[in-house]
Image (cartoon, rainbow, N blue to C red):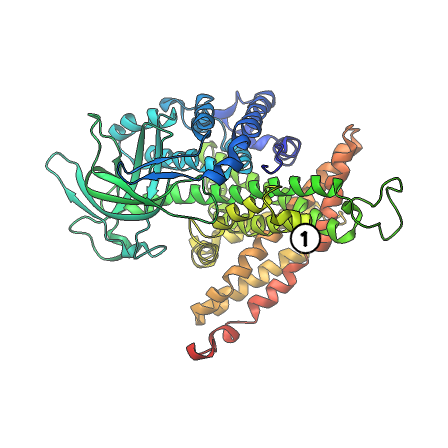
């Protein structure tokens, strides 16, 4: 049976209209027609699609996986995927945030994030097909010339065509400076692309008529390293309906996301077109990579939400032993396991982590919209700084916690969780990849401390600390102020330590990268939990009838402050302990 999933619309609405006060849309002229009622209708329809169409083929898709035909080099997706995908594209979800010029709905990215979370929660494998296409469309819209945009974007937005990103090769993963795929200029302005790519999500499938590959390759005069990488658009089917000289040569056999086609791809003088400037392909590809990293963070959140709902349902029904404080259900042979403190600890950690991570992700999404569409250039820049800073944090923290929460959900079910009967073992297998692809979480941490912290003379992290200071002053009366202020001070101390020690020895920065990312994430989420608690208290004071929901928010904030946020002190000590205990080992001493 599949895991249980009901879209958490009440919490999503609380974040959008409560915590984020409409996502800042009232200040953006582009979205002046996006009313709360319209957003509500969009969310309702998205939830219906995910709960009914995507979830229905999740477990069966895992069991069947994708099928590869060696003779035709074609891939067949699991039964029901094509119908669910078609329902998705017919409702216009692929173009929810794309401009109307290309047939999109020009909705806020905030709504796109909510839909991404719901679709990943219901069926992670299936959600990856449209997810990569959205990233490809954004890249083409940002960096391709008008001719390529007009030729490819309308059919991608409609869902007739899909997209991929082709980076990794057998000899290189993260180190893209080692790629060998070649691009030879042709007389007609096109390029002949030759090389092999691996781990290409949606590289071949039967859901769309055409697949648009975005391929990193080297021109004949390319300098060595990442400064010699160019980007090319290479379609599976050419404009004259001929099959391009490319193909899938096999599928990866994976522990999870088995309904997602992960392909070996061969390009044999395939026809392609340059996107952006020669040798500047990596900077173009980062448009898609950064979007994909945020998407992967939502994958971690979505799977964790599905796992939590399943675990909670089980804990309410499973009878085992009596409550330590005395029978809770004396008419039953035992009490539901929900009464036991350790089970509550596991469930509440899942609930509170998921809701806090959702707040961080949606807060980041709000700033994407502001960075793109606010009238004031300074406000746009401030918002973009937040997005740049938080992208590796959202990717890494939400997937680290997503995996941990799925594991806790499995543990909550005990032996039942280890079987396929409840669907959580699939979620554990599916979510595990999220900590690896689109840049491992260790790479995200290095990006944070090595690129984002020193960027613009430290402007990004300095602005975030100033934001926290400004807001915390206004909340100094609140009972959670001391805990969040202490975490903020831990983060500042860690930032200063890395800056000072990094000047002397860059390995000190590298050894502290992973704990620093977690420290920043926990602090930011602690601040957001303080704000959510305040908003819930305000709603109760105003007489909102949904007392249980808001009391749950207040108690969840209490749990976070007591059981989670205190970890920042340990993380600071970890960072400041330095590299010696890591780097002192010789190879033979491991």
In the rendered image, residue 274, in percent from the top left (x then y), is placed at 23, 39
The one nearer the camera, 185 or 208, is 208
Instruction: Kindly indicate the quadrant of the structure image that contains residue 457.
Output: bottom left
Most extreme residue toward the left, as rendered? 187
Of the 4 image quadrants, the one containing the N terminus is top right
In the rendered image, residue 327, in percent from the top left (x then y), is placed at 88, 46
Q: Residue at x 20, y 29 (%)?
A: 242
Q: Residue at x 42, y 52 (%)?
A: 439
In the rendered image, residue 187, in percent from the top left (x then y), is placed at 10, 37
The one nearer the camera, 127 or 423, is 423
Q: Which residue position is annotated with label 1?
A: 484
The secondary element bearing badge 1 is classed as helix
In the rendered image, residue 18, in percent from the top left (x then y), is placed at 66, 33
In the image, residue 582 above or below residue 410: below
Q: Is residue 203 visible?
A: no
The one nearer the camera, 18 or 196, is 196
The reply, left or right, for residue 312 in relation to residue 400 is: right
Q: Is residue 176 visible?
A: yes
The reply, left or right, for residue 212 in relation to residue 383 is: left
- Total number of numbered discs in the rendering: 1
Badge 1: few (under 14), some or many (20 or more) residues near its Cα, within 10 Å?
Answer: many
In the image, residue 271 above or below residue 255: above
């Amino acid at each position: 049976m599949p895991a249980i999933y009901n879209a958490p619309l009440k919490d999503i609405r609380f974040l959008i209209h409560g915590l984020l006060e409409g996502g800042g849309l009232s200040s953006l002229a582009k979205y002046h027609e996006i009313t709360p009622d319209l957003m509500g209708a969009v969310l309702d329809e998205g939830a219906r699609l995910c709960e009914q169409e995507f979830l229905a083929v999740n477990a069966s898709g895992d069991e069947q996986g994708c099928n590869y035909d060696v003779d035709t080099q074609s891939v067949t997706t699991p039964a029901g995927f094509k119908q669910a995908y078609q329902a998705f594209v017919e409702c216009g979800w692929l173009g929810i945030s794309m401009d109307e010029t290309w047939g999109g709905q020009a909705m806020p990215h905030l709504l796109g994030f909510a839909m991404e979370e719901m679709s990943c929660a219901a069926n992670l494998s299936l959600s990856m097909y449209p997810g990569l296409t959205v990233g490809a469309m954004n890249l083409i819209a940002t960096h391709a010339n008008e001719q390529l945009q007009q030729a490819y974007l309308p059919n991608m937005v409609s869902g007739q065509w899909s997209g991929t990103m082709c980076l990794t090769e057998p000899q290189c993963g993260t180190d893209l400076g080692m790629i060998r795929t070649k691009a030879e200029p042709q007389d007609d302005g096109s390029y002949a692309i030759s090389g092999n790519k691996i781990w290409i999500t949606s590289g071949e499938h039967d859901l769309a008529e055409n697949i648009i590959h975005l391929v990193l390759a080297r021109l004949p005069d390319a300098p060595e390293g990442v400064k010699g990488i160019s980007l090319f658009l290479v379609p599976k089917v050419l404009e004259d309906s001929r099959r391009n000289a490319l193909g899938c040569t096999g599928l990866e056999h994976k522990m999870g996301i088995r309904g997602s086609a992960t392909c070996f791809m061969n390009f044999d003088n395939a026809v392609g077109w340059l996107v952006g400037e020669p040798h500047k392909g990596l900077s173009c590809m980062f448009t898609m990579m950064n979007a994909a990293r945020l998407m992967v963070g939502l994958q971690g959140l979505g799977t964790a939400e599905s796992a939590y709902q399943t675990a909670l349902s089980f804990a309410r029904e499973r009878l085992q032993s009596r409550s330590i404080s005395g029978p809770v259900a004396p008419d039953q042979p035992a009490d539901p396991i929900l009464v036991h403190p350790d089970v509550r600890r596991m469930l509440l950690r899942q609930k509170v982590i998921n809701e806090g991570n959702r707040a961080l992700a949606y807060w980041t999404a709000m700033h994407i919209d502001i960075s793109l569409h606010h009238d004031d250039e300074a406000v746009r820049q401030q918002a973009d700084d937040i997005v740049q800073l938080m992208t590796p944090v959202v990717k890494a923290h939400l997937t680290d916690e997503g995996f941990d929460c799925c594991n806790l959900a499995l543990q909550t079910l005990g032996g039942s969780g280890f079987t396929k009967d409840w669907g959580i073992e699939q979620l554990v297998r599916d979510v595990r990849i999220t900590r690896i692809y689109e840049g491992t979480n260790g790479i995200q941490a290095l990006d944070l401390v090595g690129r984002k912290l020193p960027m613009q003379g430290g402007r990004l992290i300095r602005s975030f600390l100033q934001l926290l200071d400004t807001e915390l002053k206004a909340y100094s009366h609140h009972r959670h102020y001391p805990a969040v202020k202490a975490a903020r001070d831990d983060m500042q101390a860690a930032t200063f330590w890395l800056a000072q020690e990094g000047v002397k020895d860059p390995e000190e920065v590298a050894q502290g990268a992973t704990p620093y990312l977690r420290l920043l994430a926990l602090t930011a989420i602690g601040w957001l939990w303080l704000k959510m608690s305040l908003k819930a208290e305000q709603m109760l004071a105003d007489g909102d009838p949904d007392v249980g929901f808001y009391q749950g928010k207040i108690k969840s904030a209490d749990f976070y402050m007591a059981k989670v946020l205190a970890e920042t002190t340990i993380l600071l000590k970890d960072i400041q302990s330095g590299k010696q205990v890591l780097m002192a080992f010789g190879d033979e001493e491991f």
